[in-house]
Image: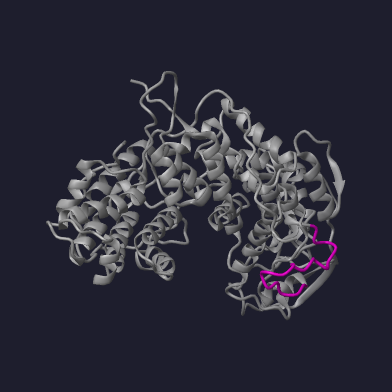
């Protein structure tokens, strides 16, 4: 793959990170984004980048003021360069655009440019402890040729867009009465402060000024912008901390703290208000910091970031397209009069996320996320599955009419299986145990002895799963019979589309009915630290989860990993326990989402040893 001069620094950075990760320039994205070869040819060609590698350098109630929680000894910030996620990179470019020009359509164009035109790949969902599930995009620190190419393409095209007319260039340069060089220096400092999240040194300004060739016209501004956007400094976050002090920990500088705060709460970069407090040093004062956090939590970007966390924690993207088998005789017979659309899957995911936003906007708690019974179906197809009216997005949402719909565990985004006519009890059980309650699950064992399972006759899904996974003498039986299967079987009252059912119709491949049997959802389930419990409904299962306290504990553990970008270790116990206690006390979601940023650990990094 040919990479032009502008990408040389990014390739070097990729090799640097590759050496740390033990990998090479391989694609690590999900199967939703197959590798594509892209030869970057942006116009105009940016000047060579001066940074060959990352340079260390009810109506809604008022948002409550975040409550600080006691800090434990130690600091946990990463000292190696972290790259922005695709979403963070996109939002950073949107913030850059809004700081330079007034253009209501810029955000949508930038989103389209990064994803569709530049083909920037989705980040891989990485779990820091290497288990098979439950990862986060912001933990993906790989950099491959597809991302380098996308950055290069984005830089050239966005620069040309921003400097698309003489009037725009004049607006970006401002009311400058000095020489062309003076105007360009001021512009570089303004754009670089947003894009690089740090004030630029005189030496850095001069490097970019030279790229303009002494001019301040459209061509010069375009070339400078393209060079800056493609710089590794725009894509990597380097934290050094203050140079004074002793001990293992060092506080972040004002600009570093503002960046960490914005990336965490907004998935974006600091805005003008945050930049002003960072550069003046005021952000390091507790009262100013607390005020900024409270302000940021009221911003719609905080809601978007919170939705992103819940989307990844609850593994909502595991729901595949629900219309993939439309036209298949067996699936069509199963679906009956309902025909899922290409958009049904996204509607089901957004129903869960709209519920999170609704609970947060009303100062609701984490427990309410588990138990809320409103339908947020914005489309007729999803509303039909829920048997509710369509929600208009602003008025009071309708309440589930079916008593079996008791909350999160029964939402279609979690119980549906996508393009399937039968349920997947094992997948459902693992989601409850792994995603919602963080139970330790043994690694799956490759055991072929269950090939002898008798699957003859008219069998329900539960009966088939039992015969395959609960055969006496196999290595599967203990784990499935006692741990995984009960949590899937208790949800058998919901079919593969997430509809409530009381019986299962067994069909052959042609869709013809072979038989019908009543649903058997009676189980004996268990969670660590709790006595096993007999149950037969989703309501009983959800109540058991609520009583166990594992939902709050699992949230705390996952939120820690999301915030600090790594797995937790023994010394992190105090941080996680403080978050758990706050969640268990019924703290509102917004304050809970801010719990990490109020801690000293969030505001410091480990000092590099000489």
Q: Is residue 581 above or below residue 324?
A: above
Q: Position of residue 73 (x, y in %)?
A: 55, 23
Q: Nearer the viewer, residue 145 or 492?
A: 145
Q: Is residue 119 left or right of residue 73?
A: left
Q: Is residue 237 left or right of residue 222?
A: right
Quarter residue 525 falls in: top right
Q: Nearer the viewer, residue 199 or 373?
A: 199
Residue depicted at x 78% and y 63%: 459
Q: Position of residue 165 (x, y in %)?
A: 26, 72
Residue segment shown in magenta: 388-406
Residue depicted at x 26% and y 48%: 11
Residue depicted at x 77% and y 72%: 388
- The reply to whether residue 419 is in sight is no
Q: Position of residue 198 (x, y in %)?
A: 34, 43
User: The N terminus appears in which quarter of the rendering?
Assistant: bottom left
Q: Residue furthest front?
A: 177
**Magenta stretch, overall SS:** loop
Q: Position of residue 184 (x, y in %)?
A: 21, 55
Q: Is residue 386 above or below residue 366?
A: below
Q: Nearer the viewer, residue 57 or 508?
A: 57
User: The C terminus appears in which quarter of the rendering?
Assistant: top left
- The reply to whether residue 542 is in sight is yes
Q: Nearer the viewer, residue 13 or 577?
A: 577
Residue 85 forms part of the magenta stretch: no
Q: Residue furthest left?
A: 213
Residue depicted at x 23% and y 63%: 222
Q: Is residue 133 left or right of residue 171?
A: right
Q: Is residue 116 above or below residue 297?
A: below
Quarter residue 324 falls in: bottom right
């Amino acid at each position: 793959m040919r990479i032009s001069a502008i990408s040389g620094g990014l390739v070097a950075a990729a090799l640097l990170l590759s050496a740390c990760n033990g990998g090479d320039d391989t694609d690590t994205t999900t199967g939703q984004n197959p590798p594509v070869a892209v030869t970057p040819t942006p116009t105009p060609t940016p000047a060579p980048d001066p940074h060959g590698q990352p340079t260390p350098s009810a109506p809604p109630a008022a948002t409550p003021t975040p409550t600080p929680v006691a800090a434990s000894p130690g600091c946990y910030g990463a000292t190696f360069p972290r790259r922005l996620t695709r979403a963070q990179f996109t939002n950073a470019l949107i913030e850059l655009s809004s700081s330079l020009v007034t253009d209501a359509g810029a955000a949508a164009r930038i989103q389209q440019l990064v994803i569709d035109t530049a083909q920037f790949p989705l980040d891989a969902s990485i779990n820091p402890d290497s288990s098979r599930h439950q990862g986060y995009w912001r933990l993906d620190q790989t950099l491959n040729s597809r991302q380098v190419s996308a950055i290069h393409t984005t830089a050239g095209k966005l620069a040309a867009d921003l400097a698309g007319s003489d009037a725009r260039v004049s607006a970006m340069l401002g009311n400058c009465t000095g020489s062309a060089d003076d105007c360009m220096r001021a512009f570089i400092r303004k754009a670089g402060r947003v894009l690089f999240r740090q004030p630029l040194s005189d030496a850095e300004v001069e490097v970019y000024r030279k790229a303009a060739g002494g001019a301040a016209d459209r061509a010069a501004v375009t070339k400078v912008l393209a060079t800056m956007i493609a710089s590794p400094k725009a894509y990597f976050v380097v934290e050094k901390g203050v140079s004074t002090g002793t001990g293992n920990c060092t506080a972040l500088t004002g600009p570093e703290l503002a960046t960490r705060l914005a990336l965490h709460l907004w998935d974006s970069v600091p805005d003008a208000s945050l930049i002003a407090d960072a550069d003046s040093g005021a952000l390091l004062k507790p009262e100013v910091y607390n005020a900024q956090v409270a302000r940021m939590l009221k911003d719609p970007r905080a809601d978007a970031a919170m939705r992103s966390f819940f989307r990844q924690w609850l593994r909502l993207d595991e729901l595949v397209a629900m219309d993939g088998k439309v036209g298949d005789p067996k699936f069509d017979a199963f679906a009956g009069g309902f025909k899922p659309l290409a958009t049904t899957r996204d509607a089901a995911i957004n129903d869960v996320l709209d519920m999170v936003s609704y609970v947060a906007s009303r100062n609701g708690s984490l427990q309410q996320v588990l138990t809320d019974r409103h339908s947020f179906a914005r489309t007729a197809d999803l509303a039909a599955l829920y048997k509710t009216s369509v929600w208009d997005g602003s008025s009071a949402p309708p309440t589930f009419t079916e008593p079996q719909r008791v909350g999160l565990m029964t939402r279609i985004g979690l119980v549906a299986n996508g393009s399937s006519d039968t349920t997947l009890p094992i997948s459902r059980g693992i989601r409850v145990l792994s995603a919602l309650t963080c139970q330790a699950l043994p690694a799956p064992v490759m055991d072929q002895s269950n090939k002898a399972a008798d699957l003859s006759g008219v069998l329900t899904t539960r009966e088939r799963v039992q015969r395959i996974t609960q055969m006496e003498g196999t290595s599967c039986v203990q784990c499935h019979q006692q741990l995984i299967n009960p949590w899937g079987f208790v949800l058998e009252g919901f079919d593969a589309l997430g509809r409530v059912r009381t019986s299962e119709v067994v069909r052959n491949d042609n869709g013809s009915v072979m038989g019908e049997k009543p649903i058997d959802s009676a189980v004996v389930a268990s969670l660590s630290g709790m006595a096993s419990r007999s149950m037969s409904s989703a309501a009983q299962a959800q109540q058991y989860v609520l009583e166990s306290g594992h939902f709050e504990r699992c949230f705390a553990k996952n939120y820690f990993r999301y915030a600090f970008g790594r797995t937790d270790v023994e010394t992190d116990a105090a941080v996680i326990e403080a978050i758990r206690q706050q969640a268990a006390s019924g703290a509102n979601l917004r304050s809970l989402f801010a719990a990490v940023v109020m801690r000293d650990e969030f505001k410091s990094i480990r000092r590099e040893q000489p």
